Structures are given as structure tokens and as C-alpha cells.
Amino acid sequence: MTLEIIRIPVLSDNYVWLVHEPVSGETMAVDPAIAEPVLEEAKARGWTITQIWNTHWHPDHTGGNAAIKDATGCTITGPAAEAERIPTLDRMVAEGDTVMLGAAEARVIDVPAHTAGHIAFHFADDQAAFVGDTLFAMGCGRLFEGTAEQMYANMRKLEALGDATRVYCAHEYTLSNGRFALTVEPDNAALVERMNEITAMRDRGEATVPTTIALERVTNPFMRASSVEELAERRAAKDAA
């Protein structure tokens, strides 16, 4: 791994990821909900933010764009399908495009469902994926603008990135997700063990992400859904919980 990835907790449960490529000195913020703590963290490390990458248009992922751009002159990249809803974008990307952070290359993956144009960024060489609100630790995003069919396809795309891939999602939802997962698979030994670990971590005030594809394959009820219909049933049940 060459990238340095820093977690910045903001708002009530959001995470902004600050990603530094040491060879070039470039630094990028993923989904900055607000600007000040992101700028402060970069300054404390002697880093200058040169880019922002957005996964989708929601304000708690783009709210800091303008202020960070004003402070740094950074370039903002995000989903082409949501360009009208992210007026600060400089570059619009979609499935198959690549984006560079210094020498580090990330591939853009279309993962619509939570929003209609949601994307993810995958650094294959660093085995890291920034997935916004599509995949969470033991959960997935609500289907605000898409379908269960789309989310099921997203799970397959992300699963294919490989077990060692670290998944950087944008919220600390793990404990509530795990509680729901136990109602779906109460006899899943891996899930029970993980929930014990997660509960202890949260009791200590620790963050529970990033996660990994390997962990999600054995404990995430949405990635483990055997059909679109099963995923839809589980998402509806989670929404009603």
C-alpha cells in the first residue's frame, strides 16, 4: 500500500476520507460533508488538498466542496450522471473512466441505487475502494433513487473486487446494521463473532470502518442475498426497523 488514508469524522456519523499519494505529494478528499475539519487535518499533516472526489450528490457528501475549492484551488471530480446536482464539479466521470491521484490510478465503477448516478472509486494496486453510501459494513444504502435490481448488481460488482479489498464507506452505521443482520442470520457464527467485536469497539469509541470485501461476504445480509427478491425483502425490512 502506498496511499496514506486518514479518516475524518464529521457531523453525527459521516466519515470524510483524506487520501495522500506520497510520491507526488497530492492529497484528495472523498465526499467532504463540510470543509473546516478537512482543511485542518490536511494542514496539520503538511498536506495540500489538490482534488476532491464525490461519489454522489447528497449534501452530506458535497457540502464542503465549494469552501475547500476556494481555499485550495483543487479540482473536483464526480459522477457525470449527477453533474446538474453538483455544480462545483470540474470533471464528470462514469463507469470505465480512470482518475489519477499522483501516480495512483483509480477506476470508476457505476453503482446506482442509493442515488441514480452514484459511483465508486477503486484503487486496484492499493486494494482500496471508496464506495460512498452503496456498501456499508454489514449494510447497504437505502434505495432512494434506484432499484433492488441495481443494488443487487452493485453487490456483485463490489464483491468481484476481491476479498483483500478494503472498503471505505461514508458512515458509521455498523452497530445498527449488525443488529439488523442478526435478525436475518441469527445462527451465522461469523456474524455473531463480528458483532461482539463491533460492540466492544463502539463501547471504546472506536471507528469500525474501513471494512473488507472478505468480511462483508460472510456477514453482510445484502451482499449475501441470494436473489434480487431477497435483497429487496431485506432492504424493506431494514427500512421499517
Image: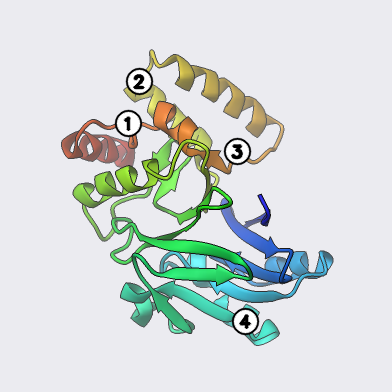
Asked if the residue at tag 1 contacts the one at tag 3, i.e. Cβ–Cβ closer than 8 Å, the answer is no
Residue bearing the label numbered 4:
74
Q: Amino acid at mark 3?
A: Thr
Residue bearing the label numbered 1:
224
Task: Give the distance between the C-alpha atoms of the residues marked 3 and 1, in whole angstroms.
Answer: 20 Å
Which colouring convention does the figure follow? rainbow
The crowding category of the residue bearing disc 1, from other C-alpha atoms within 10 Å (few below 14, some 14 to 19, many at least 20), is: some
Task: Give the distance between the C-alpha atoms of the residues marked 1 and 2, in whole angstroms.
Answer: 10 Å
- Residue 129 in sight: yes
Q: Secondary structure at mark 2?
A: loop
Q: Secondary structure at mark 1?
A: loop
Q: Amino acid at mark 4?
A: Cys
Q: Amino acid at mark 1?
A: Arg
Q: Earlier in the sequence, mark 4 or mark 1?
A: 4
Q: Amino acid at mark 2?
A: Glu
Between 28 and 124, the one lying in front of the other is 124
Q: Which mark is residue 185?
A: 2
- Residue 192 in picture, x, y percent from top left: 49, 18
Residue bearing the label numbered 3:
208
Q: Earlier in the sequence, mark 2 or mark 3?
A: 2
5 relative position to 233: left or right: right
Task: Give the distance between the C-alpha atoms of the residues marked 2 and 3, in whole angstroms.
Answer: 20 Å
Q: Residue at x 46, y 30 (%)?
A: 178
Q: Earlier in the sequence, mark 2 or mark 4?
A: 4
- Residue 27 in picture, x, y percent from top left: 68, 69
Q: Earlier in the sequence, mark 3 or mark 4?
A: 4
